[in-house]
Every structure is written in structure tokens, then in C-alpha cells.
Image (tube, helix red, strand yellow):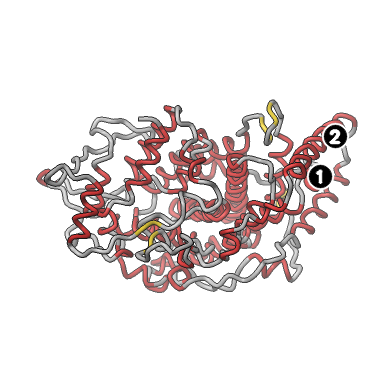
Amino acid sequence: MRLATAANEAYKASLTVSELLGCKQCGGDRGQDEVPGRGGEGASERAGGRRRGRAAGDARRSRSLPASHPNSFGERSPGRTPLKQPPGGRGRLGLTAAAQELGIRIPRPLGHGPSRFIPEKEILQVGSEDAQMHALFADSFAALGRLDNITLVMVFHPQYLESFLKTQHYLLQMDGPLPLHFRHYIGIMAAARHQCSYLVNLHVNDFLHVGGDPKWLNGLENAPQKLQNLGELNKVLAHRPWLITKEHIEGLLKAEEHSWSLAELVHAVVLLTHYHSLASFTFGCGISPEIHCDGGHTFRPPSVSNYCICDITNGNHSVDEMQVNSAGNVSVSDSFFEVEALMEKMRQLQECRDEEEASQEEMASRFEIEKRESMFVFSSDDEEVTPARDVSRHFEDTSYGYKDFSRHGMHVPTFRVQDYCWEDHGYSLVNRLYPDVGQLIDEKFHIAYNLTYNTMAMHKDVDTSMLRRAIWNYIHCMFGIRYDDYDYGEINQLLDRSFKVYIKTVVCTPEKVTKRMYDSFWRQFKHSEKVHVNLLLIEARMQAELLYALRAITRYMT
């Protein structure tokens, strides 16, 4: 089966009535005797060879791999029982008709594809002849029981996607210091800090499937004290990681009966940084809610204009924004010249590099100027977003955020990479306390940083390393992280204000990202290139958070 067909089938499979009947939000429920299992979907029980679970699991199993199929996550998928067709050979349409005969309301999907920002046809057509992507989709589906919309958008970059899926699989499902339900609950806590209902909904379901206590989902105060104690670190790490000290670490490691071990804490820190960054990707690429989650479906019939107010997800996108391309008033020639101007600046900067090099004092001064200016880069329509109750209950101090510090002119201390860096310090610490994870994360960082197709918009054979480094270092600059060998004057040459606004919003306040922001930067570039930008943003952000947290742990240990 070709990739396009596989992706389309996996996406459309979520429309089956059997899956929707098994979704709490759609009025269904999972069986009382269902045995929680790994993978988040279609849990099974092997005792006596008898399988139990909701109808959704059966529908997914019918599209899964044979029992002997090895996947790229280093394990074999369990055997699956194919779904039997109803009498008369009725397929999905037959099930729909049968449900309607029983008086069951049939929901319809909202939105048009995995992303609100990217046309569905562009995503599903990517790499239609690519056997590697077909295998990745199959492995992801076998491991998780689903192909989520994040995976479908990351399909633009298969090399990165493979590393991402491998790392996430290890963090959530393989052997590690934390029990499975703790891992998903920490994912909920991290995603909720940025009001990312998409990730919260996914991990609420996964949390329940692996045996999590439903009472914990009523609010953080109902979770064990050990997890409640993690709330402060989650808050600071998400919004002001430069404030993390060894006292934060000591408070968690010496909390008497609620204390964390060092290995558990490193696992938790990696999960927190992973999901803070993934929330940035979710908003930055306009990921649509899954069909079976809140905001992904409706029972209302289509309106005359094929649009209704309930199509707006997450509550922060206006009707005008959904219907009007704000960049539409910019001529093709104008955006073409923007690309040409950017390439000319890259050529000029390269020539300057070859001719002379700025002094250390000058580069330090340029860093401080860029760091100070980055504090005041905000969108003109920047407004407070009030978190919904179903998200805010998973974290405390909802008023705490990045904007508080920047608007009051508070100083961000400088973190010199030469004193503490990922390659020489963070990597070894993570690998020592959580074996193999350091290697997986390091591989993911390198792939994102070095990923290139040597193209820029309509141009080919372009060296984009200068531009990629400027994006990565600008993000670290916003967090106070400085590279002594980098000339920060290049950032203002390569990144215009609209691009800086988008970067700052995606990284620091992703819940405020709008389609207008996405459309307004790099207007002549392809969607795949904008997704590529988002991969750089989330990995640079994750590394920045990890550096501050791991430095604090190192200081505690010494």
C-alpha cells in the first residue's frame, strides 16, 4: 500500500462508528472489564487467550500488522484479531447505517485534515512513493493503536519523525524509573501549562488505559502529593527556566515519604521538557483535534455556508482568521523579493565572516542587545488567553507565565554554553541516570539542527546552515543562553520582525499562535519548510529547558 493511501486510511479509520461509540466525549464508554495495557489503545488480556476491550480496539486491530511484524522501536507487535464483517459483508458504511437504524446520532468531523494551517491534500500527498514513511506509519500505528495528527504533519520530514517516534516510545512505554500512569500524568501536567487541550486529551485517554486513577483527572490536588510537588518545577521550567535552582531539586529529592529519586526526577524532567516543546509544535503548526476528542467532532449538521462557530478549536481563533488569508493582500512579487533579499543577506554575511571577525567584547555586547530586544518582541494582537477549566485543573498558579517577567523588565541572567553544555554535561548526566535516553535525545537534537534539503522556497542548492543556526541561537538567546563563538548581529539581518514574533510566540506562549502569524512569515516558502522551522523551535526550546534543569541537578549533586 502506498503512503498516501495508508495515511488516508489511518486518518479516515477514526471516523468509524465503533471508535466513536468507545469515546467518552461522544457518549460511549469503555468496558468495565477492560484490562489496561500499554500502547494507549485496544488494551488486551492474555489470560486464557481471551481478549477484551472496546469496539474501537477491534476496529483498529483490523488494520494492524501481522503478529510477527517487527517494528522500528525494537520489539514485536502482539498478534491482533481481525474485525469480522457484519452479515452481508457490510463495512464502515454498513455500520453507520446500522447505528442510524438504532437511533444513534452519528457525529461528523470538524476541520479539514490534521492541521488548520496546512491543506490536507498537501499532507496526505507527501512521499506517496516513500516506503520508509509507510513503514514508519505502520510502526507508529502498531505501537500506539493510532496515527495522531502530530505524526501526520511531521510526515514532511521522515528522518526527524523516525527519531521523534523512537524517543517518545521509549519515554512512555519502555523500561524506566517511573510507572506508566505517572508518565502520562506528567505529560498532562506539562501540556496543560500551555493550555494544550489536544495533548491533554490524548494523554487523559492513555492515562486511563494504563490503569491510572480517574480521580486524579479531577484536578492536580487529587493526584498523589509526589506529583503535586512536581507542579512548581513544571511551572518554572515551562515559563522561566533560568530561575531553576538546586533548591528546587533538593525540595523534590528530600520530601520525606513523597520524595523523588534522582533517576525518577531526570525521567520527569525529560517528560516535562518533551511535552512543553510538543505543545509548541501543536500550536505552531495548527494541529487539529483528533476526531474522537473534544473539538474534533460535532453532531450538528453542516450549515449553509459549511461553517459553524463550533468549528473553532481551543477558543482563540476568530471566524475572520479561519476564513481569510491575512497574507493574501501581499503580492507574489513582494514575497518573491523577500526571498531574494534574504539570500542576498546570507551571501553578504558570509563575505563579512571571511573578511573579518568581531572581537569577543563586541560579540558579547551584541548578545546582550539581542537578548534585551527579544524581551519586547510581541504580536500587536497579543492578549491574555484564559485557560479552560478542563485544562487548568491540571496545574496551579494559572497567572504565572513568560509575559509577567518580560513586561516588567526583569533581567535574564546569561548562561554561557562554554560553562555547561548539552554535549559535555547534560548528555552524560541523563544517560547515567536514565540509560539510553540521552543517546536518543542527542540524536533528535542533531537531526533537527542539521536537517536540510539545500532548498529555500523556489531555490535549490542553497547552504541554509547560517539561517538554521540563527533560528536556533535566537531561541536560546531568549532564554539567556549564549554561545561565545557566535555573532548575534546576524540574527537581526536574517530574521525579520514577523518571523521573530512567530518564533517568540511559538516558543514562549504557544497558546497565542494564530494562523495570521503562521501566514505572515516566509510567505513564499513551502509548508514543509515552515514545519521544518517548527522542528528547530521545539528542539531548541527543549534543549534550553534541559540545560537549566540539568545544571541545577548537577549543582545539587556536587
Residue at x-position 60% and y-position 34%: 451
Determine which residue is flagged by label 1: 493
- Seen from the viewer's position, the closer of residues 499 and 124 is 124
Residue at x-position 46% and y-position 49%: 114
Using a 10 Å C-alpha cutoff, classify the residue at mark 1 as few (fewer than 14 neighbours), some (14 to 19) or many (20 or more).
some
The answer to whether residue 558 is seen in the rendering is no
In space, the residues marked 1 and 2 are separated at their CA atoms by 10 Å
User: Could you tell me which secondary element the residue under label 2 belongs to?
Assistant: helix
Image quadrant holding the N terminus, namely: top left
Image quarter of residue 382: bottom right
**Amino acid found under the numbered disc labelled 1:** Gln
The answer to whether residue 37 is seen in the rendering is yes
Give the side of residue 485 with respect to residue 508, left or right. Answer: right
Total marks in image? 2
User: Considering only vertical position in the picture, is 373 above or below 232?
Assistant: above
Which of the two labelled residues, at mark 1 and mark 2, occupies the earlier sequence position? 2
Using a 10 Å C-alpha cutoff, classify the residue at mark 2 as few (fewer than 14 neighbours), some (14 to 19) or many (20 or more).
few
- Seen from the viewer's position, the closer of residues 288 and 96 is 96
Give the side of residue 170 with respect to residue 445, left or right. Answer: left
- Seen from the viewer's position, the closer of residues 291 and 386 is 291
User: Considering only vertical position in the picture, is 555 above or below 61?
Assistant: below
| CB under 8 Å between discs 1 and 2 | yes
Residue at x-position 71% and y-position 30%: 463
Image quarter of residue 405: bottom right
Residue at x-position 16% and y-position 42%: 89
Q: Residue furthest left?
A: 48
Give the side of residue 485 with respect to residue 417, left or right. Answer: right
Determine which residue is flagged by label 2: 348
Residue 545 location, x and y as percent? 59, 53
Residue 275 location, x and y as percent? 50, 54
**Amino acid found under the numbered disc labelled 2:** Gln
Give the side of residue 283 with respect to residue 504, left or right. Answer: left
